[in-house]
Image (spheres, helix red, strand yellow):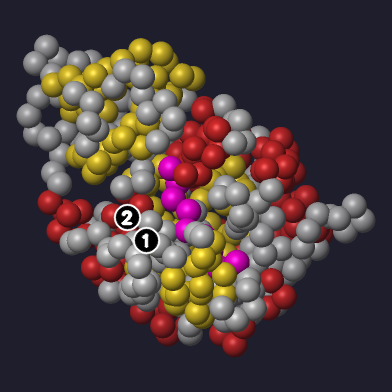
Amino acid sequence: MATPQGARGPVEPAASAARARQAPTGPQLVLKGARVVLPTGVVDAGHVVVEGTRITGTAQENAHVIDVSNHYVVPGFVDIHNHGGGGASFTSGTVDEVLTGIETHRLHGTTTLVASTVTGDMDFLAQRAGLLSELAEQGDIAGIHFEGPFISPCRKGAHSEELLRHPDPADVRKLIDAARGHAKMVTLATELPGGIDSVRLLAEHGVIAAVGHTDATYEQTVEAIDAGATVATHLFNAMPALGHRAPGPIAALLEDERVTVELINDGTHLHPAALELAFHHAGADRVAFITDAMDAAGFGDGRYMLGPLEVEVQDGVARLVEGGSIAGSTLTLDRAFKRAVTVDRLPVEDAVAALSANPARLLGMWDSIGSLEPGKYADLVVLDADFDVKGVMRRGAWVVEPPVR
C-alpha cells in the first residue's frame, strides 16, 4: 500500500470500523423534510422510514425522527468499476487494506462496490479472485470485475503489455471458477482471437461481458453485442474515436439498447460534450457512472503502483510514470454526482439513475438496492443543498452520521 509524501494516512482501522457499526435494533428511524429522490421523481418535504436494515413504508409513533430539511436523500451509490482507494489496491492489497479501500468509498456514499483488478499473471489473478471472493461472501463487496488481461495492446492504457493475452475461453473460465460465483464482469477486447466465444461463455455463466480496451471496428462490436456483451467499459476511453467513415465501437455501443455505458465523470476523462452525447444517444436509463478509482482516491497525490506499473498522481490526476497514460482516476462517486448536477446540468433524477438504479439493475440487485423503496436495504446518502455528503447509511447503520438532528 502506497503512502505518498505529505498525504494523510489511511482510514484506521478499516476492518474493525466496517464491522463495528450495527444496524439499529430499537425504534424506527425517520428522516423527514428532505427532497427524497424516488424512481417516480423528486418528492419535496418527503420522508424515509428505516427499520433495522430495511426501508419500510409506515412510521410508528415511537420512531426516532431526524429533521433533514433543506437536504436531499438519495439511494446509496453503486460502483461497478473500482480498483481501490484510501491508499489501498484491490489488485494487490491485503484483506485489511482492501477493507480500507472499501471504507474510503463508503465515506463518500458508495454503499455497494464491485472490486476491479488490473492485468496480471493468470495464477496471480486467480489468487486475487480467491481473496476477493471471501470478501464478497462476507458482504463487503458485491463481486469482482476482471479488467484485463484479455485486452488489446493497441488500447492497453495503464495495463502491462507483457502480461496481456488473447481471451481464450479456457483462461476466462479459470478466472470465473476462481471467483467462486462472485465474478460479476470481465472486460474484453472482443475482436481478439477467442473474444466472441468468451463473450458467449460469460453470458452462459451469468457474468457481464464488457467491451473495453478495444480496437474493434463498428461491425466487430455489433457482433460482440449480438453474442451477449452488455457493457461498455469507460465509454470513449481506451477505444478508437468516433469517426464519420469508421464509427468504431462507440457508435455501436451507444446505439444498442442492450448496452449499459460506463462513464468516468471526473472532468479529466471526458469533455462535457462527450458526456452529453452519451446521455442523448443512450438515454439516462443506460448510463452508469463509475470511478475507475485507483489507490489515491480519497488519499492524496504521490507515487503508487497500479499492478506492476508505477503511477504519478498530481493534482488528483493519475498518469503512468512511463508514457504518461491516464491510469484510472482518483474519483469518488459523490464528486461524480456533484459534477453531474452542477457542471453538466443533469436533472437530479438522471444522476441518481446513473449512480444507483442503473448499476443496481445491471448487477441483478434491483430487488434489494438502487432506490429508496420499501423492502429494499436502507442504503442512502444525505446531501446538502450544494450536493455535498452530510450522511451515509448502509444496511440501516450510519457510516457518516448527519449533524442535523
Q: Main secondary structure of the magenta part?
A: loop
Secondary structure beneath label 1: loop
Where is residue 387 shown, x and y percent of the image? 43, 32
Tell me which segment is drawn in magenta.
326-334
Kindly identify which numbered label has been placed on residue 113: none
- On the image, which quarter does residue 156 sit in? bottom right
Instruction: Confirm whether the magenta stretch covers residue 294.
Output: no
Q: Residue furthest bottom?
A: 162
Kindly identify which numbered label has been placed on residue 299: 1
Q: Amino acid at mark 2?
A: Thr
What whole-number distance in Å separates the C-alpha atoms at marks 2 and 1?
9 Å
Instruction: Confirm whether the magenta stretch covers residue 328.
Output: yes
Where is residue 243 shown, x and y percent of the image? 86, 55
Give the answer, above or below, for where 109 lies relative to 175: above
The numbered mark, 2 or 1, whose residue comes first in the sequence reads: 2
Where is residue 246 shown, x and y percent of the image? 88, 58
For residue 93, side relative to residue 350 (left or right): left
For residue 18, side relative to residue 193 (left or right): left
Kindly identify which numbered label has been placed on residue 104: 2
For the N terminus, which image quadrant?
Answer: bottom left
- On the image, which quarter does residue 325 sit in? bottom right
Give the answer, above or below, for where 116 lies relative to 159: above
Front residue of 83 and 207: 83
Q: Which numbered mark, 2 or 1, is in the foreground of this view?
A: 1
Cβ atoms under marks 2 and 1 closer than 8 Å:
yes
Secondary structure beneath label 2: helix
Residue at 25% over, 41% down: 400
